[in-house]
Image (cartoon, rainbow, N blue to C red):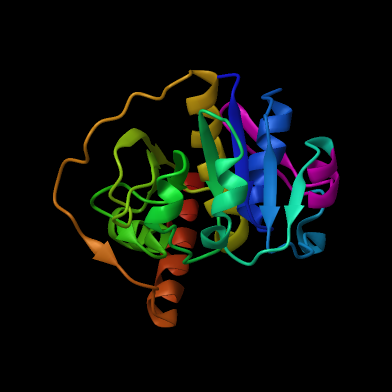
């Protein structure tokens, strides 16, 4: 895969994606960042995360990664306002790392293909904060790679993975880490064949704080059982 590009905003997922790509010597034709804001990673500095053959070491700023990839900063607040900029780029597909809850509209989807990593097993866990729901239901988490479709979380699947629970922050680190793990696996193995989603569709919405607390309690129980084992 020699002709891929990246488009996203300033969040932990973007940080994990770009560092993972850099660590694995994966080149990008274009890196586009919109709605640019400083990303505060200070409370996680020097945090090292590893799982099987994948690692992240939070020691450099997002800005240094953007400099490394010679990123283009575009002063627009949504990918949906960037049709002309996207149309100018000739690339096989974009790796997408958008804003939380941002839905890419059809007029953008027609411009190119957008690879998205969803933190849930599709179609069983569509929607928002599914990482917590699968933790509650199954004591494990999943990630699904697919190309965006006009229907939310309904695109053709490239690959899905199941992940063990890791003893790290769930909101910022774990979610981004498992997504970056699957992304690198796909790119290294050059997997772009797609299949239709199969199974019962279940949609979830932003998790209630009480349920989220129960999920985090479940996480601690899972980790405790693993240590005892």
Q: Give the quadrant of residue 194.
A: top left
Going 25% across and 31% down the picture, which residue do you hit?
Answer: 195
Q: Percent position (x, y) of residue 213? A: 45, 75
Task: Choose between 211 and 40: the one closer to the eye.
Answer: 40
Task: Choose between 141 and 27: the one closer to the eye.
Answer: 27
Q: Quadrant of the C terminus?
A: top left
Residue 117 showing in the rendered view: yes
Going 41% across and 48% down the picture, which residue do you hit?
Answer: 109
Q: Is residue 215 left or right of residue 94?
A: left
Q: Quadrant of the N terminus?
A: top right
Q: Percent position (x, y) of residue 57? A: 75, 41
Residue 167 showing in the rendered view: no
Q: Is residue 183 left or right of residue 162?
A: right
Q: Is residue 172 left or right of residue 224?
A: right
Task: Choose between 42 and 88: the one closer to the eye.
Answer: 88
Going 78% across and 50% down the picture, which residue do you hit?
Answer: 62
Q: Compared to 180, does 152 lie above or below?
A: below
Q: How many marks?
A: 0
Task: Choose between 176 and 164: the one closer to the eye.
Answer: 176
Q: Is residue 23 left or right of residue 208?
A: right
Q: Compared to 193, does 80 lie above or below?
A: below
Q: Percent position (x, y) of residue 150? A: 32, 53
Specify whether residue 49 is painted magenta: yes
Q: Percent position (x, y) of residue 113? A: 44, 38
Specify whether residue 104 is painted magenta: no
Magenta stretch: give its range.
47-67
Going 58% across and 64% down the picture, which residue do you hit?
Answer: 78
């Amino acid at each position: 895969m020699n002709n891929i590009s990246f488009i996203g905003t300033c969040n932990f997922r973007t940080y994990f994606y770009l560092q993972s790509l850099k660590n694995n010597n994966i080149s990008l034709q274009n890196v586009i960042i919109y709605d640019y804001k400083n990303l505060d990673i200070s409370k996680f500095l020097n945090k090292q995360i590893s799982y099987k053959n994948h690692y992240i070491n939070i020691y450099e700023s997002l800005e240094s990664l953007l400099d490394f990839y010679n990123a283009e900063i575009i002063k627009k607040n949504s990918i949906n306002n960037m049709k002309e900029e996207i149309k100018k780029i000739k690339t096989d597909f974009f790796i997408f790392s958008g804003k939380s809850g941002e839905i890419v509209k059809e007029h953008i989807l027609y411009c190119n293909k957008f690879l998205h990593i969803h933190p849930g097993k599709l179609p069983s866990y569509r929607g928002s904060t599914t990482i917590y729901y699968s933790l509650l239901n199954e004591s494990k988490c999943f990630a699904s790679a697919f190309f965006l479709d006009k229907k939310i979380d309904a695109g053709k699947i490239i690959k899905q993975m199941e992940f063990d629970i890791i003893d790290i922050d769930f909101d910022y680190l774990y979610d981004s880490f498992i997504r970056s793990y699957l992304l690198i696996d796909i790119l290294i193995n050059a997997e772009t064949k797609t299949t239709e989603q199969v199974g019962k569709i279940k949609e979830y919405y932003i998790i209630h704080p009480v349920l989220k607390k129960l999920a985090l309690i479940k996480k601690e129980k899972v980790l405790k059982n693993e240590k005892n084992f």
